Amino acid sequence: MKTTKKPEYLGSKSKIPESPQDFIIDGIKNPHPNKDYVIRFSSPELTSICPITSQPDFGCVILDYVPKNLILESKSFKLFLFSFRNFGGFHEDCTILIGKKIEKFIKPKWLRVASFWNPRGGIPIDVFYQNGKKPDNVYVEKLNVSPYTGRF
């Protein structure tokens, strides 16, 4: 794991990775390791490929996490999400893969990944992955996503 050396992607020209499965996420030393606080990343442009029809799926992903020793480097996260563009996975696969990768590389105290997928066939699919219980002493903003009408 890259906890002691310079982040791979930050400050350098990067190409879009081939696959999220092989992607290595960069973590940066948490400047406040003795405090519990929440970091939120939002991306309204998550794209993957349906493994059955090979049609593109579009969604929004929101990541909330309480860091431990490392924080997620944002460019690394952006490139990781880009790597889903040619990835054949169901919405559930993509959401859980995002959560598992972040757990593996930055080992947060708590995380929640929420993905809101645009409807295909008239049915939106929202997927939530969470590890453990959110610490009581932190505030997490309510998920307020309504990218289109029809979602309650």
Image: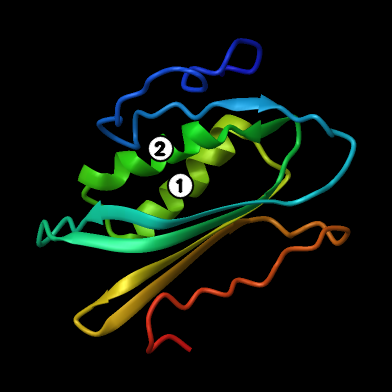
Which dot, 2 or 1, sits closer to the camera?
2
Q: Between 16 and 53, which is closer to the camera in this rendering? A: 16
Q: Amino acid at mark 1?
A: Ile
Residue 133 picture location, percent across and down: 73, 59
Mark 2 surroundings within 10 Å by alpha-carbon count, few (fewer than 14), some (14 through 19), many (20 or more): many
**What residue occupies the far left of the structure in this picture?**
53
Furthest-top residue in this view: 5
* Residue placed under numbered mark 1 in the picture: 98
* Location of residue 140 in the rendering, given as x and y in whole percent from the top left corner: 73, 63
Q: Which residue is mark 2?
A: 80
Few, some or many residues within 10 Å of mark 1 (<14, 14–19, 20+): many
Residue 11 drawn at (x, y percent): 50, 19
| Residue at x 36% of width, y 63% of height | 59
Towards the viewer: 24 or 152: 152
Disc ID at residue 122: none
Q: Are marks 2 and 1 in contact (CB under 8 Å)?
A: yes
Mark 2 / mark 1, whichever is N-terminal: 2
| Residue at position x 55%, y 34% in the image | 104
User: Quadrant location of residue 35?
Assistant: top right
Measured along the vertical axis of the image, is residue 19 above or below residue 7? below
Q: Secondary structure at mark 1?
A: helix
In this rendered view, identify the residue nearer to me: 23 or 8: 8
Residue at 68% x, 56% y is: 132
Asked where in the image residue 113 lies, by quadrant, the reply is bottom right
Horizontal arrangement in the rendering, residue 140 relative to residue 95 (left or right): right
Residue 6 to residue 86: above or below: above
Answer left or right for 33 relative to 11.
Answer: right
Q: Is residue 118 above or below residue 58?
A: below
